[in-house]
Image (cartoon, helix red, strand yellow):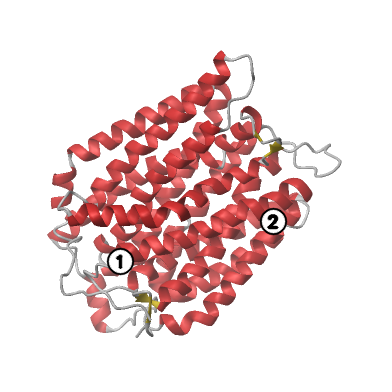
Amino acid sequence: MQQGTLWGHPKGLFILFFTELWERFSYYGMRAILVLYLTAETTDKINPGLGWTSKEALVLYGWYGMFVYFMGIFGGAIADKWLGQKKSVLYGGILIILGQFALAVEGMTTFYTGLVLLVCGVGLLKPNISTMVGGLYKTGDARRDTGFTIFYIGINIGAVLAPIIVGFYGEKVDWHLGFSLAGFGMIVGQIVYVYGRKYLTGVGELLKHSEEHAHLINQPLTKIEKDRMTVMFISFFIVMVFWAAYEQAGGLMNLYARDKIDRFVFGYEIPTSFFQSLHALYVVILGAPIAWFWIQWRKKGKESSSIFKMGVGSIIMSIGFVALMGAAYDVSVSALDKAPVYWLFLSYLLHVVAELSLSPVALSFITKLAPLKYASLMMGTYFAVVGLGNKLAGMLGEAAQDSGEMAIFAGIAITTFLLGVLILLFVKKLKALTHGAEDIDSKIVFVEPE
C-alpha cells in the first residue's frame, strides 16, 4: 500500500510530480532549441548550427514530435505485458539520459542516434507515469482530477525552467551544452524516482499472469465498456486537433517569434527560446485558480464533465489564434516588418487557459474510462494521438512557409472554434455514453494534510 499523504494526496503523487518535472525539463529544453539549432547558420563563428531551411527543420520537428509520443502505444503495451509501469518509467528515463548526451556530441550520427533514444525513452516513460498517477486513487475518489492538476503543474515547472536554462546556454553559448544540460536534468529526475519508489508500493506493478488474470484479459468488452471506449476515441480526436494547434509553439511560432516579433522590451531583446517558457509559466500561475474555478462551477450544479471542458478549451484555443492573426495583420499593414510582442504574450496566455481546461482533464478522463486490462495501452494510445497532433502541427508549419502565417493562423482558429461548438452541442449524448464514469463517490473524504 502507499505510505501516507501530503496536503491531502498520496505522497507518491509528489514523487511522480518531481520525476515528471525533470523529464519535462529534458523534453522542453530539447524542444526550445531543436528548430533554432537546425536553422542556425553553419558559418556562425560563435555558435554554428546545421544550416537547414525553415521548411526542412519543421519537417523534422513534425516527425520527431509524432514519434516521441506515438511510441507511447508500444511503451504502454510493454508495461502491460512485460515490465509493469514502474520499471518502464525507470528504463525510459535511462534512455532519455543517453539520448540527451548523444545530442551533446557533435556529428550527424550521434544527432540522429540521440533522437531515436529520446523517442524510445519518452515512449516508455510518458504514458506509464501518467497511468501511475491514476493508480494512486481509488475509483470515484474526488481527489483524482485535482491530483492530475498538481501533477500537471509539476510538468510545467520543468517546462518553465528548461527554455530559460537550456535555451539560454544553447542559443547564446553552445547548442551542445544546451542538450547536455537537458540530460543532467533527467539524471536528477531519475534520482528522485529511485529514492521515492517506497511511496509507490502497489502502484504500477506488473499484474501477475494468474488464471484469474488470464480470464480477465480474455473476457470480451461489456456494453458499458464499449460505450466508454467510443467516448474515449472521440476524445482522442479532440486531443489530436488541440495539440496540432498548441504545438505550433515549438515550430512555426518559434520561428515567427524569432523573425517577425519585435522582442525588445525596455531596451533588452528577449532570446527567442525564452518564449517557450511562457506556456509553462502561465500554467504554474493559473493551474490552481482554474482548477478552483471548475470545482466551484461544479458545486453550483453547472455542467462540468470532461467532455464539456474539452469543448470550452477548444473555443478558447481558437481565440488565442485570433490574437496571432492580429500580429500577422499588424505586420501586413504597418511600415514595420515586425509585430508588437504583446500579441505573443496574449496568444500564449489564451492557449494555456485552453490547455488547463482540456489536457489534465483528458489524462484523468482516460484513467476513468479505460478498461483495467487496457489501462497502459489506452494511455499510450492517448500519447500516440498527441504525437499525431505534433505531426499535423509540423505540416501546418511547413504550409505556412508557402501560404503565409495569416492563412494558417486563421485556419486553426476557425477549425478549433467549430470543433468546440460541435462538442458543446453533443455534450449530453457523449456524457451518457460514459455511464457515470465521472460520478464522484460521496463516501470519499479528503485527508487532512500532514
* Residue 267 in view (yes/no): yes
Residue 144 is labelled as 1
The residue located at (37%, 77%) in the rendering is: 10
In the rendered image of this protein, does residue 145 appear above or below residue 312?
Answer: below
In the rendered image of this protein, does residue 305 appear above or below residue 39?
Answer: below
Instruction: Please identify the quarter of the rendering in which residue 436 is found.
Output: bottom left
Kind of residue indicated by mark 1: Arg
Q: Is residue 228 left or right of residue 253?
A: left
| Residue at the outermost right position | 45
Q: Are the residues flagged by discs 1 and 2 in contact, CB closer than 8 Å?
A: no
In the rendered image of this protein, does residue 353 appear above or below residue 157?
Answer: above
> Looking at the picture, how far across and down is residue 21, in whole percent?
52, 64
The residue located at (84%, 36%) in the rendering is: 43
Mark 2 highlights which residue?
Answer: 179
Q: Of tags 1 and 2, which is closer to the observer?
A: 1
In the rendered image of this protein, does residue 298 appear above or below residue 90?
Answer: above
Kind of residue indicated by mark 2: Phe
Of residues 18 and 302, the one nearer the viewer is: 302
Report crowding for label 2: few under 14, some 14 to 19, many 20 or more residues within 10 A (C-alpha).
many
> Looking at the picture, how far across and down is residue 154, in whole percent?
48, 62
Instruction: Please identify the quarter of the rendering in which residue 318 is found.
Output: top left
Q: CA distance from mark 1 to mark 2?
A: 35 Å
* Residue 82 in view (yes/no): no
The residue located at (68%, 42%) in the rendering is: 271
Question: If the image is split into quadrants, where does the N terminus sit?
Answer: bottom left
Query: Helix, strand or loop at disc 1?
Result: helix
